[in-house]
């Protein structure tokens, strides 16, 4: 890979990837006759110099970006409804999601909301809500600013209920971005902790997609290559970032989200309740459950674990994939025990209940019961 070049990909949508591609945004929007996009971002990114310069560059091209940044760390339905109101009040004509997974999830849900006025959770994937997505969706651009969720290439969005904080998945093929600008320069200044936690999330997407049930060699191939890219670059991107490591992480996280069209599994089923119950950051929750989830999935999947070990470049044949991941999260200075993020033994019953009902579990290669989850959470305390 030549990191001084820009690349064009079209799987599964139009992707511009490479250092500096963000400077193509004004021309792209002008070509589409877009004059007033709603720019959905989070409160942190909104204050960063590169964000202000993107808005300025739009302005110079006669495009008025209307910024919406009011959202929770785990976004809720009212965040989406408020964003839809801002879009309508300002008569916007497109949506740009610019940020991490949260901003992109909220942007995608707002894109759904604009011309679909039923209760937002009528479009819940578990209720086959995608069948109700029949109207036009605004022109939708995604611009990731970290290498983690890969939400820029997704067609679904996770939004929680305001009161219960239960996560609901909204999905529809029409929610795929019309255009992605994946520019590693936007990720250069991400602090070490978030680089590590989001990078581990990206790694988990590829690992879980590869292990997920079902025949999907294209997803498997993408996942294995992305795992190698992450193995080569996550530590450097975290502690000594350069364009090469940031580029590898950004494309690998995007690849993870392409691969997990195949499905995810128990690591995400264990992690999601930690966000629901103690409001844990998703990447941190994934990091805490990664080794345990892999350990659970090893029996019966030894051949796949060997291929994962190769992709992760594990040189010592005696080191298991789960031990390697635990070692990796230690080196990245990520928390090692769920008690460090506020989990107490009295939480374990509800965590296990939520995990056993999680939407990622059906794709996991090995079946898991509530008792399995109770044991795993107790061992992780
Ligand atoms: Fe994830």
Image: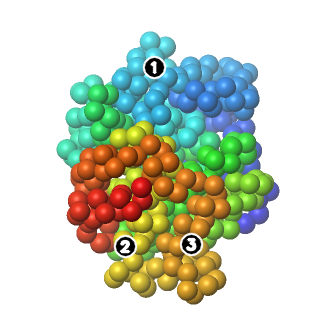
Can you say whether 24 is above or below 37 in the image?
A: below
Mark 3 crowd level (few <14, some 14–19, many ≥20, 10 Å Cα) = some
Can you say which quadrant of the picture contains the N terminus? bottom right
Q: Left or right: where does residue 372 sit relative to residue 51?
A: left
Q: Are marks 3 and 1 in contact (CB under 8 Å)?
A: no
**Disc 1 packing (10 Å; few <14; some 14–19; many ≥20):** many
Q: Return the x and y of residue 360 as percentages of the image width and height.
A: 32, 57
Residue on which the image places disc 1: 87
Could you say which disc has been placed on residue 324 in the image? 3
Residue indicated by mark 2? 297
Residue at x 69% of width, y 20% of height: 59
Residue at 32%, 41% (x, y): give it. 167
Residue 378 at x, y = what percent?
A: 35, 59
Query: Measured from the top left, where is residue 362 in percent x and y?
Result: 26, 62
Image coloring type: rainbow
> Circles 1 and 2: CB distance less than 8 Å?
no
In terms of secondary structure, where does tag 3 sit? Answer: helix
The quadrant of the picture occupied by the C terminus is: bottom left
Say if residue 158 shows up in the picture: no
| Relative depth, front residue between 37 and 361 | 361
């Amino acid at each position: 890979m030549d990191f001084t070049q820009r690349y064009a990909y079209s799987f599964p949508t139009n992707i511009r990837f490479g250092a500096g591609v963000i400077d193509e945004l004004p021309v792209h929007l002008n070509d589409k006759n877009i004059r007033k996009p709603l720019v959905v971002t989070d409160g942190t990114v909104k204050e960063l110099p590169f964000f202000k310069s993107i808005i300025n560059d739009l302005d110079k091209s006669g495009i008025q970006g209307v910024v919406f940044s009011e959202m929770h760390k785990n976004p809720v339905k009212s965040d989406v409804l408020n964003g839809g109101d801002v879009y309508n009040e300002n008569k916007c004509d497109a949506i740009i999601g610019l940020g991490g997974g949260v901003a992109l999830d909220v942007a995608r849900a707002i894109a759904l909301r604009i011309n679909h006025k039923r209760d937002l959770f009528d479009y819940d994937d578990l209720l086959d809500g995608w069948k109700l997505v029949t109207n036009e969706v605004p022109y939708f651009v995604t611009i990731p600013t970290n290498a983690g969720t890969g939400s820029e290439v997704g067609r679904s969005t996770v939004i929680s209920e305001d009161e219960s904080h239960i996560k609901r998945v909204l999905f529809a093929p029409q929610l795929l971005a019309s255009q992605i600008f994946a520019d590693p320069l936007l990720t250069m200044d991400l602090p070490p902790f978030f680089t590590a936690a989001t990078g581990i999330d990206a790694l988990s997407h590829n690992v879980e997609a590869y292990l997920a049930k079902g025949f999907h060699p294209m997803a498997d191939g993408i996942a294995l290559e992305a795992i190698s890219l992450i193995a080569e670059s996550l530590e450097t991107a975290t502690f000594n970032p350069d364009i090469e490591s940031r580029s590898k992480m950004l494309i690998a996280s995007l690849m993870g989200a392409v691969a997990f069209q195949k499905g995810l599994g128990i690591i995400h089923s264990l992690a999601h309740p930690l966000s629901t119950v103690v409001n844990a950051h998703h990447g941190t929750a994934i990091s805490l459950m990664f080794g345990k989830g892999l350990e659970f999935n090893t029996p019966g999947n030894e051949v796949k674990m060997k291929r994962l070990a190769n992709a992760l470049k594990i040189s010592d044949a005696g080191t298991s994939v789960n031990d390697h991941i635990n070692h990796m999260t230690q080196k990245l200075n990520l928390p090692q025990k769920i008690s460090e993020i506020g989990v107490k033994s009295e939480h374990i019953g509800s965590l296990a209940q939520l995990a056993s009902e999680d939407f990622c579990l059906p794709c996991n290669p090995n079946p898991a019961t509530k008792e399995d989850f109770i044991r795993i959470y107790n061992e992780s305390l």
